[in-house]
Amino acid sequence: AQKITQTQPGMFVQEKEAVTLDCTYDTSDQSYGLFWYKQPSSGEMIFLIYQGSYDEQNATEGRYSLNFQKARKSANLVISASQLGDSAMYFCAMRGPTYSSASKIIFGSGTRLSIRP
Amino acid sequence: DAGVIQSPRHEVTEMGQEVTLRCKPISGHDYLFWYRQTMMRGLELLIYFNNNVPIDDSGMPEDRFSAKMPNASFSTLKIQPSEPRDSAVYFCASSLMAGDWYEQYFGPGTRLTVT
């Protein structure tokens, strides 16, 4: 069975500092994908970044990068130069192989990130 | 594109009443997902459809919950009868499977309160 673990319920970071949000996963599939979503206080879910299990390069999207360590089964999100608007709940998620009709995304419990001015 | 549209945005109802939540996915997307989010249980997948066909409803809590997708542009999640423990934010998401990965686009959610 697939499982996503986020061990940091909450984090406080000073504005402009870099921050790493931890995510570990467990799966027996060889092909899978890892996602990060942001949920601000307004409630919507915003897609941030994706990493495929066969991607050799770490994914990057602007200030977001995904530190993918396959052997350790970790997919940490790194936010560089944090901004006040980064304060939100962050969810790590995983999907199974796309060739499986039962492939679906499962979510971790989330990390609440608060940026201090 | 307008994104995923959900209605109503807020619903307050009394225990025992029927509740219907609606979702319009992004045009052209072939997957539709219904999620429930609570403080205690986090984000849970209730059911998802592919090309209007339910694929996995193992997350549906009990028979009081039902979901339909009569066509590619509309889905409903119905709770009958509603109970206070059903109070949550219900998200609809859609995606297009392309190549090796797909991204789910979430709607704004429906905040349901059952008193």
Image (cartoon, coloured by chain):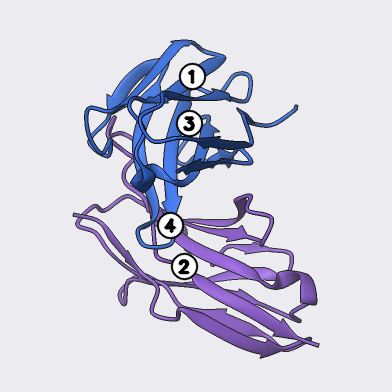
Q: Position of residue B19 (x, y in %)?
A: 45, 26
Q: Which color is chain A depicted in?
A: purple
- B40 left or right of B1 in image: left
Callout 1: chain:
B
Does residue A23 show up?
yes
How many discs mark residues in the rendered view? 4
Q: CA distance from mark 3 to mark 2?
A: 25 Å
Q: CA distance from mark 1 to mark 3?
A: 19 Å
State the residue at coordinates (71%, 82%). Answer: A115
Q: Position of residue B111 (x, y in %)?
A: 56, 43
Residue A115, compared with residue B61, is above or below; it is below
Callout 4: chain:
A
- A40 left or right of B25 in image: right
Q: Which residue is mark 1?
A: B75
Mark 1 vs mark 2: same chain?
no
Residue B97 disc label: 3
Amino acid at dot 3: Met
Amino acid at dot 4: Ala
How many neighbours does mark 2 have within 10 angstroms: few (below 14), some (14-19), or many (20 or more)?
Answer: many
> Which tag, 1 or 3, sits closer to the chain's start?
1
Residue A93 disc label: 4
Tag 4–tag 3 contact (CB < 8 Å): no
Q: Which residue is mark 2?
A: A110
Mark 1 vs mark 3: same chain?
yes
Residue B30, compared with residue A6, is above or below; it is above
Mark 2 vs mark 4: same chain?
yes
> Which tag, 2 or 4, sits closer to the chain's start?
4
Which of the 4 quarters of the picture holds residue B3? Answer: top right
